[in-house]
């Protein structure tokens, strides 16, 4: 079955991925243990690795091997080979479609623009940022035109495809629009509730080392493999599935708010268990050992963080464990108190601080605005006004300043456009998978109360992780749940839970 060109292609791909894994290791080190004086040389190391990786990805031989494999009848009956070829062709075309000058200009303007954003945000001065944002969107439009998009699609799809292969702005709009209306209704419903939950119990003072030990115990219980991974501390938490048998999680601790690190760690562990579940031992470097998309990746993190971690069942298991680790910090606390405290829903200004329900409204606002900016339907100078109008319409709040409004996120400043929707796609996929999982594992609730998460993890391993990139996200969703992606499961989950918490 294996032809010479296919073997050469896979050997090359494995070397390229190995370079990528070294880059991931030094990047992780930079975010965790690198001493300050090492930063300058680290930049040199990373730029060399980036250059070597780019050269490997755009090597002419890759194109020749791909063409030979694509016309090779012997590979046709092999679905894994076909999935690999589809994805490798896509990567190669994308890597070679951008002119070198455009790549260099995007890097240069991106870093200048990010500096301008920092300054503008600190001084609440949108005018200072405006010309840079205009340049970035013009460059992103150029980039999208190089990539191109499917017939019937639009410019946005080309950028979205980098993070969510195969998805289109139209499809996202079709799911987001009903979600937006119903979420806005939910927000209004709980704003008027008499019996609002208090989250005071989360503000006990608990030292970081105790939080770390508790976090590790929780991650172990849910199934993160510490023989094949670590948990460390950083300023901006992330997960890096850098190599076979090596997945690094990072988190950060606030002594006065222990749930931040707990949910941050569970979130990253969800990403980490996906990485650990991919068939990297067998196929490292091949697309069939890689994650499907950012949306599916995020579905894994959100599932463990929100669907598991914010459930009453989880706290039945985790409260005694927290007591063991926190000493006498939670003596009178009840499961119900914790459950209510971690499930408040209240409109707020800042996306990264938003709760499970309102978070999606923040994402939708960004999706609508970046799409309009890219299509030219919205001028950059009108962005603050449109931003503020939407925050009023969807969340019912007034935006006091652009610093806390349209300049709060770093993404657009360096050209991360088409990325935001993957956060909400993750929540939606998680909701739809969760509905199916509960049908397939009818006693999941009582298992979780006992701290038994094995059946859930096995379901995710066999249904999602094991396939790597064999299927596209939409295809996998249809295959697993029998339906295309819909807003209903997430909304039903949120309403069921929050109606109970708010007593409405
Ligand atoms: Zn995440």
Image (cartoon, rainbow, N blue to C red):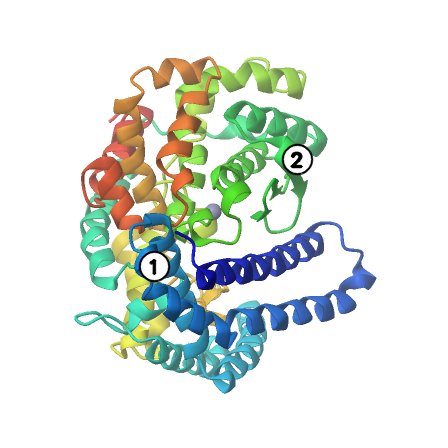
**Residue 160 relative to residue 412: left or right:** left
Numbered disc 2: secondary structure = loop
**In this view, 314 is above or below 36:** above
The residue labelled by disc 2 is: 255
Residue in view at x 23 percent, y 33 percent: 492
In the rendered image, the residue lying farthest to the right is 37
Instruction: Let me know if residue 350 appears in the view.
Output: no
Return the residue nearer the eye: 492 or 353.
492
**In this view, 161 is above or below 177:** below
Residue 259, given in percent of the width and then of the height, sits at: 54, 33
Q: Residues within 10 Å of mark 2 (few under 14, many from 20)?
A: some
Residue in view at x 76 percent, y 55 percent: 34
Instruction: Let me know if residue 16 appears in the view.
Output: yes
Residue in view at x 59 percent, y 20 percent: 322
**Residue 226 relative to residue 441: left or right:** right
- Quadrant into which the C terminus falls: top left
Residue in view at x 52 percent, y 60 percent: 13
Return the residue nearer the eye: 188 or 17.
17
**Residue 217 relative to residue 156: left or right:** right
Residue 82's label in the rendered image is none
**Residue 269 relative to residue 35: left or right:** left
The residue labelled by disc 1 is: 165
Q: Residues within 10 Å of mark 1 (few under 14, many from 20)?
A: many
Residue 222, given in percent of the width and then of the height, sits at: 51, 26
* Nearest to viewer (mark 2 / mark 1): 1
């Amino acid at each position: 079955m294996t032809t010479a060109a296919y073997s050469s292609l896979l050997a090359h791909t494995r070397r390229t991925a190995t370079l990528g894994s070294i880059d991931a290791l030094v990047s992780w080190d930079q975010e965790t243990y690198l001493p300050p004086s090492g930063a300058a040389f680290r930049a040199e190391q990373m730029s060399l690795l980036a250059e070597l990786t780019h050269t490997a990805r755009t090597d002419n031989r890759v194109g020749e091997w791909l063409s030979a494999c694509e016309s090779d009848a012997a590979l046709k009956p092999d679905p894994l080979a076909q999935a690999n070829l589809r994805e490798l062709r896509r990567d190669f075309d994308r890597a070679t479609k951008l002119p070198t000058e455009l790549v260099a200009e995007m890097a240069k303007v991106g870093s200048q623009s990010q500096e301008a954003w920092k300054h503008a945000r600190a001084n609440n001065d949108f005018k200072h940022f405006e010309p840079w944002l205009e340049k970035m969107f013009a460059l992103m439009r150029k980039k999208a035109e190089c990539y191109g998009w499917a017939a019937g699609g639009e410019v946005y799809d080309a950028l979205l495809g980098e993070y969510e292969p195969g998805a289109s702005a139209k499809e996202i709009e079709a799911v987001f629009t009903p979600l937006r209306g119903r979420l806005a209704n939910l927000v209004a419903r709980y704003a008027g509730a008499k019996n609002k939950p208090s989250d005071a119990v989360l503000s006990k003072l608990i030292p970081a080392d105790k939080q770390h030990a508790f976090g590790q115990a929780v991650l172990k219980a849910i199934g993160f493999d510490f023989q094949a991974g670590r948990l460390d501390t950083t300023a901006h938490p992330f997960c890096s599935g850098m190599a076979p048998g090596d997945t690094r999680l990072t988190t950060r601790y606030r002594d006065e708010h222990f749930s931040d690190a707990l949910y941050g760690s569970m979130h990253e562990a969800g990403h980490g268990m996906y990485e650990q579940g991919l068939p990297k031992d067998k196929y490292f470097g091949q697309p069939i050992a890689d994650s499907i998309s950012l949306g599916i990746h995020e579905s894994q993190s959100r599932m463990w963080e929100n669907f598991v971690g914010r459930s009453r069942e989880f706290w039945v298991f985790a409260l005694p464990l927290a007591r063991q680790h926190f000493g006498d910090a939670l003596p009178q606390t009840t499961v119900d108190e914790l459950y209510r405290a971690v499930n408040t829903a209240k409109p707020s200004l800042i996306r990264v601080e938003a709760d499970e329900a309102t978070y999606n409204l923040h994402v939708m606002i960004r999706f609508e605005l970046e799409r309009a900016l890219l299509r030219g339907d919205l001028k950059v100078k009108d962005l603050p006004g449109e931003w503020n109008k939407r925050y009023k319409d969807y969340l019912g709040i007034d935006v006091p300043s652009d610093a806390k409004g349209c300049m709060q996120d770093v993404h657009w400043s360096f050209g991360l456009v088409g990325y935001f929707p993957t956060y909400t796609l993750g929540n939606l996929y998680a909701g739809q998978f969760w509905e199916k999982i509960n049908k397939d594992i009818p006693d999941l609730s009582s298992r979780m109360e006992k701290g038994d998460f094995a059946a859930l993890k096995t379901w995710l391993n066999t249904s999602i992780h094991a396939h790597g990139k064999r299927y596209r996200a939409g295809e996998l969703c249809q295959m697993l749940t029998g339906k295309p992606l819909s807003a209903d499961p997430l909304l039903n989950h949120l309403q069921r839970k929050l109606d109970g918490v708010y007593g409405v």
